Image (spheres, rainbow, N blue to C red):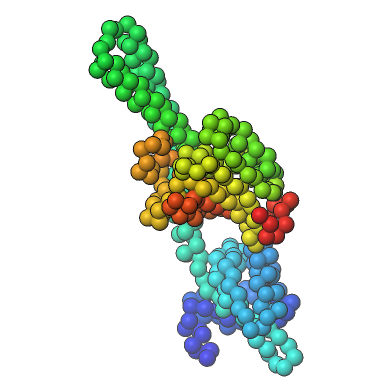
Amino acid sequence: MRSVLENSPETVIILNEQGLIVSTLQSKDACGFEQTIGDGENYLEFIHAGDRTQFVGAMREVGSNPLSRARWEGRIRDAEGNYRWVDCTITAQYLDAEVPALVLYQRDIHSRRTAEAERLEALTLSNLRLEEFAYMAAHDLREPLRAISLYTQILFKNTLMNAETTQMVGFVREGTARMFALIDSLLSYARTGAHEPTQDVDLQRATAQAIQNLSTEIEGSHAHVIVGQLPTVRSNEIQIVRLFQNLLSNAIKFRSTRPIEIHVTAERVGQNLAVKITDNGLGISPEDQARIFQPFVRLANPAVRGTGLGLAVCKKIVEGIGGSLRVESAVGVGSSFIFTIKSGAEHGLPDGAA
């Protein structure tokens, strides 16, 4: 057994209930930090301070249920005083009938984690540059578009036109208005995701603000918006208001012939908060549900105007606050857009409440 373990990529470390090292069997491929660890030393002292709490939680989980096992990834100090990433499988054993022990099967994953961090940093930088480019491009397009709009109006006022040319001018005006809407959407999309400080956000108040911003649309469509009990969370209020506003506006746009009814509810699911916006509109076919969150994707409905960026902005906002956004829908019945907020700090909502 010793020969097998010495030739495996794992190192076996046995701890007692207090985390003191009882025995270590180091593999030939180990990164070297075990050489500094002696029997009787506290293994916790070699763990990076930022990873120690998770390791203690894994120890307690296995200690309370000896038949279970736990996985933990963290940083361990090596012989040179540097920290390296390791992956541990933790199980419970008994040294004799009375003394329980924890057995760590430890593997060096430092190269993989370092490569992942480098790729994430490169991707973040690339996304930042793309957002900056989209913002500058959209901003610079405004001025020539304003000129087109202005001179079209002058031409229309100062030129004698027949029915055909009047119709052409109307096409230009309509196209210019669509371009302005698209540029505004691009600017909104580019700004979404910028790092902004978090604060306590009352979702009840944020929803009320979104409803107030949409008051003209709501009154004009005779929509009935019913808001349930919503809690306070740690997030960004401006982004949350935009999120509610986009989802409510979307529900009004894609309405059916029935009177519009929209429900806003929330439910705590473990450490997450799930917020649901449910409508009785047209619904979305299964093949469209997988792509509606992509930029510039619009459903084939010429009666509804838009740029195809509204739901993409919603998705970006939700992911920016550490959550996820999905849709549940049936054609002819309606849709439910559900987003989560990954936070255990919300209050004002009991477990399972909606």
In this rendering, the answer to whether 52 lies above or below 98 is above
- In the picture, which quadrant includes the C terminus? bottom right
Horizontal side of 170 relative to 226 (left or right) equals left
In this rendering, the answer to whether 97 lies above or below 16 is below
Q: Residue 64 placed where, x, y %?
A: 71, 79
Q: Residue 163 placed where, x, y %?
A: 26, 15
In this rendering, the answer to whether 266 lies above or below 12 is above
Q: Is residue 193 visible?
A: no
Quarter occupied by residue 176: top left
In the displayed image of the protein, which residue is found farthest to the front? Answer: 258
Q: Residue 234 placed where, x, y %?
A: 67, 47
- Number of marks present in the image shown: 0
- Image point (70%, 93%), residue name: 96
Quarter occupied by residue 119: bottom left
- Image point (58%, 62%), residue name: 82
- Image point (44%, 51%), residue name: 332
Q: Residue 172 placed where, x, y %?
A: 32, 22
Q: Is residue 349 visible?
A: yes
Horizontal side of 343 relative to 174 (left or right) equals right
Report the front residue among 209 and 1.
209
